Amino acid sequence: MAVLVTGGAGYIGSHTSIELLEAGHEVIIVDNLCNSDKIVLERIKELSGKSPKFYEIDITDKEKMEVVFKENKINSIIHFAALKAVGESVAMPVEYYSNNLISTLVLFELMKKYNVKNFVFSSSATVYGDPEKLPILEDSSLSVTNPYGRTKLMIEDMLRDIYYADNSLNIAILRYFNPIGAHKSGIIGEEPNGIPNNIMPYITKVAVGQLPHLNVFGDDYNTVDGTGVRDYIHVLDLAHGHVKALEKLSENPGIVTYNLGTGRGYSVLELVKAFSKASGKEIPYKITDRRPGDIASCYSDPTKAEKELGWKAKYGIDEMCEDSWRWQSQNPNGYKK
């Protein structure tokens, strides 16, 4: 039986694919490589000793996706593939709604046809919007402040409706916070195409001299130093959380939702300081205007995941920064030679 990993050549998907292979799962990756590189597949094999099966397909293409379902006995799906940048989603809402929603619908149409019952959805803490209180629990009120977050919440609502109509399904919604870090080997990490939208690859590219400075979006929030506070989680902890979620689905729990975070928030400037310590590099930065759709603070209460999945983040901010720097310093041009 196999696990289909959509977006499996991407940042979180690649680390999760390694974790799945090491846990003994057969892995099938579908990725259109719009924000990843085919060389990742070689490095997954190098690190795990096993080769995932790979299809270069856009999952909004139902006809091509049906080939994947016909050729493989798929038991479970982990759905990462999505456009995922908050700022970009504000400028490109049509593309975000089209890609993120249609891809999920295609998967469920094929799951029904081929009798696939287990589904893990890559959701986000953005569904909590500007939280009323901190830390955030899974039953906190849901709202969104940008189109990216709205696609995640709309898909969550879709999943709840789909489960209501067919409770033979098992669905895990994983709301994770801000993934950073890289594999301990330094062989794979976060390498977005073009100018990074996420903070850590931006910091690392400043550190290797590819970008002049970090833009810090706002210093007038009600936080410890005026900059935005986020719950940063190591990508390896996140990958492990997906394996634990699959194990949970084998118990036929129905539809379940978990926060994946550390429960500790750090400001942008605290993150910059931690990275400087880990790398020995000063990170020049400039304060700019707030970014549309951003909020002041967001950090989790991950107690439910620890209690029900037996999962708990084990890496702290120093290790996240050390591993991010190891990846970038060993691969200054990312996956390009």
Image (cartoon, helix red, strand yellow):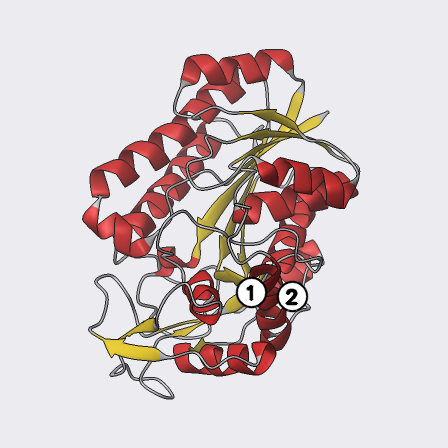
* Residue sitting at x 31%, y 85%: 226
Q: Position of residue 330 (x, y in %)?
A: 62, 60
Pointer 1 residue: 233
Would you place residue 50 above or below residue 214 in this image?
above
Does residue 135 show up?
yes
SS for dot 2: loop
Q: Position of residue 38 (x, y in %)?
A: 56, 34
Does residue 23 show up?
no
Q: Which three-letter amino acid code belongs to the residue tagged 1?
A: Ile
Residue extending farthest to the front is 337
Q: Quadrant of residue 124?
A: bottom left
* Residue sitting at x 75%, y 34%: 25
Residue 262 versus residue 169: which sits nearer the camera? Answer: 262
Q: Is the Cβ of the residue at disc 1 closer than 8 Å to that at disc 2?
A: yes
Relative side of 330 to 310, left or right: left
Q: CA distance from mark 1 to mark 2?
A: 7 Å
Q: Check residue 302 in the rendering and tell me which mark sits there, or answer none.
A: none
Pointer 2 residue: 313
Q: Which three-letter amino acid code belongs to the residue tagged 2?
A: Ala
